[in-house]
Image (cartoon, rainbow, N blue to C red):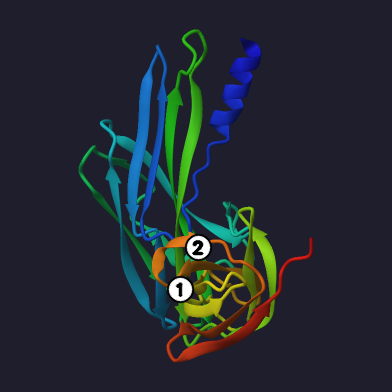
């Protein structure tokens, strides 16, 4: 019983929910049902990402809408955090103030709030860009954390756990913008499937995202349409951007590419910004 309790304790303490950078909205639902207690923690947050452009000295007020789908009120603690993008595209949130952080520019409406069941709460925050701010990109997250006490074992003590959500905020200051360029291409396994991948470098001052469609005919003579991942490419970084493929006649079902394949076309990454692609992806070595 002690071993089972320790394993369960470790799992509950390790619960950390992170919002995808590409999500338009977010939903979090955690539930525990035991003979002793049934509990549920369920929130919907919109939007999950802000992409703003401000001038030095400019102020912006924004709203996050929080909806509680549980039958019980949700008590939340709010704070800002810095974050970094890991090689596997997951987000690492950092509570400590990082060098050159812009979190001091941010003011939250409150640090704690209670969201009633079925009644959306509109939480406000404000960004004040200093007059002296140089061109660049301010990035931070607004963290919402729910503290709960669960009693998963009828004869065990209550166990605290924290469900954390991060709303990502980008602020392009002044004339900051991305500058993307293709620096490589390869075939790599993505989720266990051999996939064409573009290596893209950002030499600009703000993050960028590739969008658009490419075309190709693979080794099975199947006409394919390929689109890049929507993941952000941060300033100064080189990112691996996988291309997902669908048949031109069935553009809602992803398919595996049969190599070799030549892929061509044009991708966009900003207003009047584009990148031409004409690349052969060879079959991976056995």
- Disc 2 secondary structure class: strand
Q: Position of residue 264 (x, y in %)?
A: 56, 84
Residue 231 is at least partly visible in this image: no
**Quadrant of res 70:** top left
Q: Is residue 74 left or right of residue 165?
A: left
* Residue 214 position within the rendered picture, expressed as x and y whole percent measured from the top left: 51, 79
Task: Tell me residue 196's x, y (percent).
Answer: 63, 70
Check disc 1 and report its element: helix, strand or loop: strand
Question: What residue sits 58% from the left and 24% below the top?
Answer: 9
Residue carrying label 2: 140
- Mark 1 neighbour class, 10 Å CA radius: few under 14, some 14 to 19, many 20 or more: many
Foreground residue, 17 or 285? Answer: 285
Q: Residue at x 36, y 75 (%)?
A: 59
Residue denoted by label 1: 171
Q: Is residue 137 above or below residue 123?
A: below
Residue 74, quarter of picture: top left
């Amino acid at each position: 019983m002690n071993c089972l309790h320790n394993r369960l304790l470790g799992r509950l303490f390790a619960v950390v929910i992170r919002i995808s950078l590409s999500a338009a909205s977010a939903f979090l639902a955690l539930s525990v049902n035991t003979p002793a207690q049934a509990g549920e923690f369920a929130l919907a947050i919109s939007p999950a990402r802000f992409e703003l452009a401000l001038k030095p000295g400019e102020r912006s007020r924004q709203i996050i809408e929080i909806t509680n789908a549980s039958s019980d009120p949700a008590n939340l603690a709010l704070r800002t955090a810095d974050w970094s993008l890991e090689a596997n595209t997951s987000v690492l949130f950092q509570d400590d103030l990082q060098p050159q952080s812009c979190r001091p520019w941010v003011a939250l409406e409150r640090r704690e709030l209670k969201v009633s069941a079925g009644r959306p709460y509109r939480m406000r925050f404000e960004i004040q860009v200093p007059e002296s701010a140089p061109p660049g990109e301010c990035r931070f997250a607004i963290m919402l954390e729910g503290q709960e006490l669960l009693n998963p074992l009828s004869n065990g003590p209550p166990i605290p756990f924290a469900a954390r959500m991060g709303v990502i905020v980008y602020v392009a200051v002044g004339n900051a913008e991305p500058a993307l360029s293709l620096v490589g291409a390869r075939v790599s396994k993505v989720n266990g499937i051999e996939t064409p991948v573009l290596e893209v470098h950002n030499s600009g001052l703000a993050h960028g995202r590739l969008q658009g469609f490419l075309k190709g005919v693979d080794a099975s003579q199947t006409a394919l349409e390929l689109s890049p991942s929507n993941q952000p490419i941060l300033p100064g970084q080189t990112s691996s951007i996988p291309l997902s493929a669908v048949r031109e006649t069935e553009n809602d079902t992803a398919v595996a590419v049969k190599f070799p394949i030549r892929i061509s076309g044009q991708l966009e990454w900003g207003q009047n910004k584009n990148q031409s692609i004409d690349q052969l992806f060879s079959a991976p070595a056995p």
